Amino acid sequence: MNILFTNAGRRTYLIEYALDLMKQGYGINVFVCDTTTDTAAMFVSADVRNFITPRVSDSEEKYFEVLLQHCLINEIKLIIPLMDFELPVLAKNKTLLENHGIKVWVSDYALILSCLDKKRNVEFCRKNGITLPRTWFQPEDVKYPLVKKKIQGSGSVGLEIYKNKPDYLTFIEGEDMLQQFIAGKEIGMDIFNDYNGNYVHSCFREKLLMRAGETDKAQSFFDSTLEHEAKRISKLTGHVGNLDIDLILTPKGEIYYIDFNPRFGGGYPFTHLSGANYIKYIIEDSLGIQPQIPVFEQRITGMKGISLYIHT
């Protein structure tokens, strides 16, 4: 079976996890695509095959047209998407892909929008009793300290923290939002559902260091209260695959949710290396093997390093 990681970028670890399964005897071939050949994930191994697609931001229609052509030519049967801005396109075309015998692990279009658009996400959370920091979409009657974010932001682009009232607050109505700053531990939560949107597993990590909006150092752990929350959110969303959530846990044990990412995020390696192999579940499911339920085996503290990938 040929599997494809789309817009893989620097997510080399996910490619390595799939290659590990290939070496273990799983009948898979690994493909990667991105918008340029200067992409680290394409050169993890000589066993990785790759192709180029247009940028989603230039034309969603052209992106999908080229992607589908390559999938048909290369007999791709499984797609694991890794970039926010392609998710709506893939969600809208999920049935078409399935009609071609291609399984794409993406949630439905409405849920994708309710995660990627933070204004819609606030409405979704309020409707379903998911606690958020106090939120404003206009810079009036706000309380400091606060955090400014992009409504359509990704990777913490445009995020600013104001501990005190500034002389001048840069704010673009319709593009920016403001949230109450909550002091506490920043926790990453992975909630993994099967292809039908049913809960499979969850794992948690305390973020020790962030870099460019991605988890750089973290410690994984298990917590029964957070597991209960994960199962509740899984049922509310019915998402497909991984849902990467950021939350704040206060010293009083209060939980405030701050971000929902309906894909594998930069914190997944800490889940994976703790024993919860979600990639294996996806591949076993797609091969028609009864997938093994991931298990949290050990608490780990992890730190990302730097590797250099070259092509000539």
Image: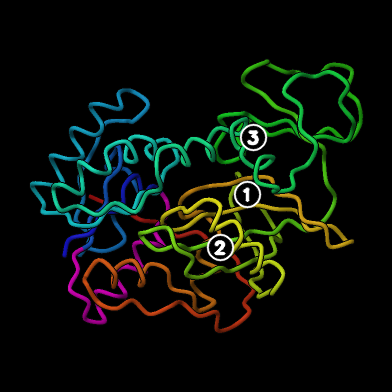
Identify the residue under disc 1: 211
Q: Earlier in the sequence, mark 1 or mark 2?
A: 1
Identify the residue under disc 2: 304
Q: Quadrant of the N terminus?
A: bottom left
Which residues fall within the magenta stretch? 10-29
Does residue 103 belong to the magenta stretch? no
Above or below 274: residue 143: above
Residue 165 is left or right of residue 303, and the answer is right
Q: CA distance from mark 1 to mark 3?
A: 29 Å
Above or below 252: residue 33: above
Mark sitting on residue 123: 3
Contact? badges 1 and 2 (CB < 8 Å): yes
The colour scheme applied to this rendered structure is rainbow
Above or below 22: residue 195: above
Instruction: Indicate the secondary structure of the residue bearing disc 1.
Output: strand
Q: CA distance from mark 1 to mark 2?
A: 10 Å
Q: Amino acid at mark 2?
A: Lys
Instruction: Indicate the secondary structure of the residue bearing disc 2.
Output: loop
